[in-house]
Each structure stands twice: as structure tokens, then as C-alpha cells.
Image (spheres, grey):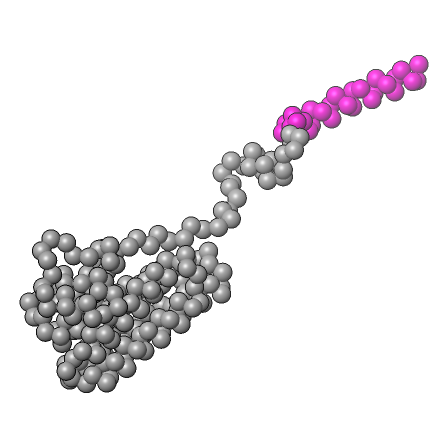
């Protein structure tokens, strides 16, 4: 008889204790087989999401204004024969034409052509600086990567400054300074190119600016 009374008391206590359990604990089936802790957290808290593993790199769209590649050579009217002859004396004549022809204002003497080529180089250097700045500002970059891109940004900035000094020296007909400033551009841009991979957006810019600067030096060499 005492055993039966104890069993009844046990079942009564078990019944009331089940009523006191929180409903989500009493009904939760537990995580599905193979489910991770993060899956269970997301299921219970749909407003919480895990942070992305990486951030997208900023989009660097090429600027047509500075697209001085051979594929963007001027079309339509044939280039001025005097300009064509001067560009043929450079290592990259098609690039020379695409750099100078659209911006030449009638004058086709060597100094005027060199002045336009220098101005185009200065503008392209600024575009390279802006591109490097955007890439360096990507928060997903490892610190070492951002440091390299910042150095390239400084290299393009210095190149633009040197182009400006070359333009001033050309006005003074100081060809020695013109050549010195242009040669320094190749050095600064070469330092950047040596530290980046060939698939970097900056690589094609360093390559193009180096060719543009080489053309400027070639044109400078034929000034009497």
C-alpha cells in the first residue's frame, strides 16, 4: 500500500514539473543531425547573420578620358603627316598618336607635340594615383598589400609632379631637366611595377605610363 502511494505521488510531481518547464525547452527537438551550432543560432535568431568572410574589392572602372592604349588610337581623319613622322621615331608610334593627336591644337612642331605628350603623361599619372588610392583603401586588404599599394600611389603622385617639372623646363627650353624629370618617372613607376603582380589593375597602368614616358624621351631627343 505504501509503495502504491509513493508511485502516485511521483506521477503527480512529474506532471506538475512538466507544466513549469519553459515551452521552448519542452518542445525543442534539438539540432538536426549534422547541423552546426551556427545553424541552430540562425534558426532561433533570424535577425542575426554571420559577418561575411571578406569584403568586395572596390570597382575600378577604366576612364575613357585616360584610355591612351593603342586600341584607343584616334580614328577618322588621318593624323597630320608631321605628327606621324615624329611618332614614328618613338618605340610606340601608335600609342604616341593616340596620346597626342586628339589633344594637339594645330601646332605640329616638335616642342608643341612634346608638350602635349607631357601633359597627357601628367594626367595619366594622376589617374594612376587615384586608382592606387582606391585599391589601397579597400579594408579587406592585408596590411602588407595596402602598404605596397600606398607606395604605388606615392609613385604615381611623384610621377605627376615630375611631369609638371618637365613641362616647366620645356618652356624654359631646359632639355636636360626635361630628360632628367622624365627618366625619374620611369624609375618611380618601375619601382611600383616590381612590387605588384601582373594581374593587378595597376600593372597595365604602370606599363602604359612607362611607354608614354619613353615616347616623351624619344621626342625630346630629336629637338634641335
Identify which residue is drawn at 14% across, 61% down: 102
Question: Quick one: 90 or 185, which is closer to the camera?
Answer: 90
Residue 181 in view here? yes
Q: What span is in magenta?
A: 1-29
Question: Quick one: 170 or 218, which is closer to the camera?
Answer: 218
Magenta-drawn stretch, dominant element (helix, strand or loop) = helix
**Image height check: is 215 above or below 12?**
below
**Image height check: is 123 above or below 176?**
above
Question: Quick one: 85 or 201, which is closer to the camera?
Answer: 85
Identify which residue is drawn at 48% across, 50% down: 54
Residue 172 within the magenta-colored segment of the rendering: no
Question: Quick one: 46 or 147, which is closer to the camera?
Answer: 147
> Is the C terminus in the top left, top right, bottom left or bottom right quadrant?
bottom left
Quick check: 142 left or right of 210?
right
Residue 6 location, x and y as percent?
88, 20
Quick check: 73 left or right of 109?
right
Identify which residue is drawn at 28% across, 82% down: 180
Q: Quadrant of residue 203?
A: bottom left
Residue 21 within the magenta-colored segment of the rendering: yes
Identify which residue is drawn at 51% across, 48% down: 53
Q: Quadrant of residue 146?
A: bottom left
Residue 16 location, x and y as percent?
73, 23
> Is the N terminus in the top left, top right, bottom left or bottom right quadrant?
top right
Residue 74 location, x and y as percent?
16, 57
Residue 137 in view here? no
**Image height check: is 34 above or below 215?**
above
Exactly how many numbered labels are in the figure? Answer: 0
Amino acid at each position: 500500500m505504501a509503495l502504491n502511494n509513493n508511485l502516485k505521488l511521483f506521477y503527480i510531481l512529474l506532471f506538475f514539473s512538466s507544466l513549469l518547464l519553459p515551452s521552448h525547452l519542452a518542445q525543442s527537438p534539438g539540432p538536426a543531425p549534422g547541423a552546426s551550432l551556427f545553424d541552430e543560432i540562425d534558426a532561433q535568431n533570424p535577425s542575426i547573420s554571420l559577418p561575411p568572410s571578406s569584403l568586395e574589392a572596390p570597382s575600378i572602372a577604366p576612364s575613357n578620358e585616360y584610355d591612351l592604349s593603342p586600341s584607343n588610337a584616334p580614328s577618322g581623319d588621318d593624323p597630320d603627316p608631321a605628327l606621324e613622322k615624329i611618332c614614328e621615331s618613338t618605340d610606340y608610334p601608335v600609342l604616341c598618336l593616340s596620346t597626342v593627336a586628339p589633344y594637339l591644337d594645330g601646332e605640329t612642331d616638335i616642342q608643341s607635340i612634346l608638350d602635349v605628350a607631357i601633359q597627357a603623361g601628367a594626367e595619366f599619372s594622376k589617374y594612376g594615383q587615384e586608382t592606387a588610392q582606391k585599391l589601397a583603401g579597400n579594408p579587406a586588404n592585408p596590411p602588407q598589400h595596402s602598404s605596397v599599394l600606398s607606395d604605388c600611389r606615392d609613385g604615381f603622385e611623384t610621377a605627376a609632379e615630375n611631369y609638371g617639372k618637365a613641362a616647366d623646363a620645356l618652356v624654359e627650353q631646359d632639355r636636360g631637366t626635361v630628360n632628367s624629370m622624365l627618366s625619374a618617372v620611369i624609375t618611380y613607376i618601375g619601382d611600383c611595377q616590381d612590387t605588384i603582380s601582373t594581374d593587378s589593375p595597376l600593372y597595365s597602368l604602370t606599363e602604359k605610363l612607362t611607354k608614354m614616358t619613353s615616347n616623351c624621351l624619344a621626342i625630346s631627343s630629336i629637338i634641335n
